[in-house]
Amino acid sequence: MSEILQDLAENYSIGRPEMAEHPNRPFEVYDILRRSSPVKRVENQPRIGGPDASGWLLTRYEDVWDVFSDDEHFSSIGLMGHSEDNSIPTGAIALDDVDPRVMARMAQRIPMLMDPPEFLPYRRMMTPLLSPQRLAVREQYTRHLVNQLIDDFIETGACDFHSQLNKPLPGILTCELLGLPIDQWRYYADPIDDFLHREGPSALMAKSESYEDSAFAKMQVPGMMGMLRVAEERRREPRSDIISELVKNTHEGRELNAYELGAMLSILLSGGTETTTSALGSALIYLGRNPELRAQLGGDSNAVPAFVEEVLRMWPPLMTFFRVVKKRRELGDKMLEPGEIMYLCLASANRDPEEFDEPNKFCPDRQPNRHVTFTVGVHRCVGSTLARMELRIAIEEVLRRLPDYRLVEEEVVMTPNFPSAYGYLRIGAQFEPGAREVS
C-alpha cells in the first residue's frame, strides 16, 4: 500500500486534491477503508451552504443499506447547510409573492430533504410522473432525439460525446417531459452542471452564512422561477406534460403553492439531467476502450440493459449520499449520536466483495446486480426508470451508427470534482463519417 493511499484513508476528506489525482484513486481509498475501518469517524468534512461537519463514513454495503432503510434513527432533514428554518411555507402563496431567498432555501427540498410521514404525500404526487407506463410512450421520441443529436456530428467524423450527446440528451428530454421550451434547455440544465462539474471542489466547499445564501442554492433560483412561470400558464391551459400534472395536485385540501412547486420541480430538473450525462460518459468510455464488448453489444441489444446496470454499479454519478442521526443508535462497534452526519459511500458499497463477486471487475452480464446507485428505501430515486431508458437507447443508437468510434484519449477530461460527482468535461472521439438519418 502506498503512503499516499494510507494517508488519504487515515485522514479522509473528500475535498482533498489528492483524491482527484487518478480516476481509480477514490475507489482505492474506499477499498482500504472498507477493510480497515468500515464505520470511520471523520472530522471537518466540507458541506454545501454551511460549516464543516463531523460524523461517520460508511463504506460497507450492509451498513449503507441499513441506514438508508432506517427512517426511525436517520433523517434527511438538515443535510444542506445549517439553515435553522427547515419548514415549508404553507397556504396560498402566489408567484408574485415569492421571496427569492426563501425560494433558494427550498431548492431540492421536496421530497429529498424531508422525512416520513410528511414527505409521503409529496412523493405520491411525483411517483406517477415518471412511472414505467408513462415513460414507455416516450421511447420513440427519445430514440428520435438521440438520432437528431448524432446527425449533428456524424458527417464530420469526430465529436465530443459530452457536449454533443451526453449533456443535451437528458437536458432536452427533461425539458420536454416537464413542459419547458426545449430550445431553452441550456438555461435550465447548464447552471447545475457547471456548478457540480466545471467549478470543481472549490464551489462545493465555498462557505456561506446558510444554505439559502450558498452559491449552490442561489444558482437554482432562476430556473425554479422560470418553471413556476410555466406552471402558472399550465393552470390556465394544461397540456400533456409533467408540470400540467403536478399543478393539478392538492395538499391538505389546497393547491400547491409556489414554494412547494418550485422545490419539487427543482429536484425533477436536477435529477433528470445529471445522472444520465455522467453515466453515459462512463459507458461510452468503457466501450471505447473495449472494442470486443462494443461489437458484442452492437450485435445483441438484449444485452444492453445488464451492461447499463454494471456501469451504474462501477461508476455511480453521485458517489456519496448523506443522512443525519436523529436517534442514538449503535452501528458496528460505534455509537452514533443525534446530529452527527452519516456519509453513505455508494461508490464503496457498490464494490463490496461481501455483496459482489470480483467487485472491481467489470462484468457486463452481472446477475444479480443489487447496486445502490439510486439509493434504497423510501427515498429511492424517482427518476431511475427514466435514466435507464435514456442510457439504454443512447447506447443502442451509438453502437448502431458509430460502431467504429475511437476515443481520442488526450481529449478525455474528467470533472475536477469526480471524487464527489463522477463524470467528464470532454470525451473526444473519431469515427468513419456517416449519413444523416432524421433530417
Image (spheres, rainbow, N blue to C red):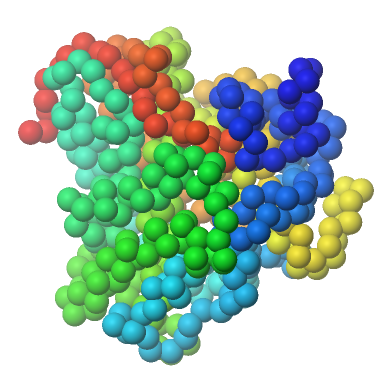
The quadrant in which the C terminus is found is top left
Does 260 appear above or below 173? below
Does 51 appear above or below 247? above
x then y, percent, for residue 13: 69, 40
Give the camera-side residue of 232 and 23.
23
- Looking at the image, residue 182 sits to the left or right of residue 80; the answer is left
The residue at the point 46 percent across, 45 percent down is: 196
x then y, percent, for residue 407: 36, 15
Asked if residue 11 can be seen in this view, the reply is yes
In the figure, residue 247 lies in which quadrant?
bottom left
Give the camera-side residue of 198 and 241.
198
Residue projecting furthest to the right: 333
In the figure, residue 94 lies in which quadrant?
bottom left
Does 320 appear above or below 7? below
x then y, percent, for residue 81: 60, 62
Give the camera-side residue of 353 and 159.
159
- Looking at the image, residue 292 sits to the left or right of residue 144; the answer is right
x then y, percent, for residue 263: 43, 68
The residue at the point 51 percent across, 79 percent down is: 88
The quadrant in which the N terminus is found is top right
Count of all numbered marks drawn on residues in the image: 0
Asked if residue 304 can be seen in this view, the reply is no
The residue at the point 82 percent across, 31 percent down is: 35
